[in-house]
Image (cartoon, grey):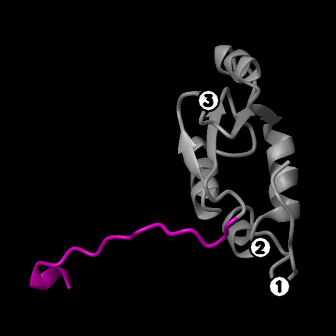
Amino acid sequence: MQRLGITPTHVRRATGNRLTGKTVVVTGTLTRFSRDEIHALIEREGGKPSCSVSSKTSYVVAGEAAGSKVERAKGLGVAVLTEDEFWRWCRQRCSTRVLALFVGYSGVGKSVVGHPP
């Protein structure tokens, strides 16, 4: 294809729907995920990763030294999850196909149901 002047591009698409219509802010230092990995996980579940907390934010995932974004989220009544809480929620509710892309989750084929906390 490249010889014909066509450059293939990869378009990410959601494979799950647990975060459809939700905006998730990730802040602080993460230990389980890189920033790109957690943003990809959010997108694959249909969510929108964001950098700033607003009244439209659905969840904040807070790593260590999260700072003022957590305080702002609390002031707006936005749910704040630790990185471990977010991961536990994902393991219980996210598409197993999505989880297989991260850490080689072995539960592929299991039925996973539920809603965000």
Q: How many badges with numbers are in the image?
A: 3
Please state which amino acid type lies under the numbered disc 3: Ser
Residue 117, horizontal then vertical, whole percent: 86, 48
User: Residue 64's x, y, as percent?
Assistant: 75, 24
Secondary structure type for disc 2? helix
Between the C-alphas of marks 3 and 2, the distance is 30 Å
User: Label 1's element?
Assistant: loop
Q: Earlier in the sequence, mark 1 or mark 3?
A: 3
In the depicted structure, whether residue 79 falls above or below residue 23: above
Residue 46 against residue 59 in the figure, above or below: below
Q: Earlier in the sequence, mark 3 or mark 2?
A: 3
The magenta span reads 1-17
Q: Residue 103 occupies which quadrant of the picture? A: bottom right
Q: CB of mark 1 within 8 Å of CB of mark 2?
A: yes
Mark 1 and mark 2: span between their CA atoms? 7 Å
Q: In front: 23, or 10?
A: 23
Find residue 9 and report its image quarter. Answer: bottom left
Number of residues whose C-alpha sits closer than 10 Å to that of mark 1, classed few (under 14), some (14–19) or many (20 or more)? few
Among the two numbered marks 1 and 2 on one chain, the one whose residue lies closer to the N terminus: 2
Q: Which residue is mark 1?
A: 109
Query: What residue do we see at 77% from left, 64% from top?
Result: 94
Q: Secondary structure at mark 3?
A: loop
Residue where numbered disc 2 is placed: 96
The residue wearing badge 3 is 55
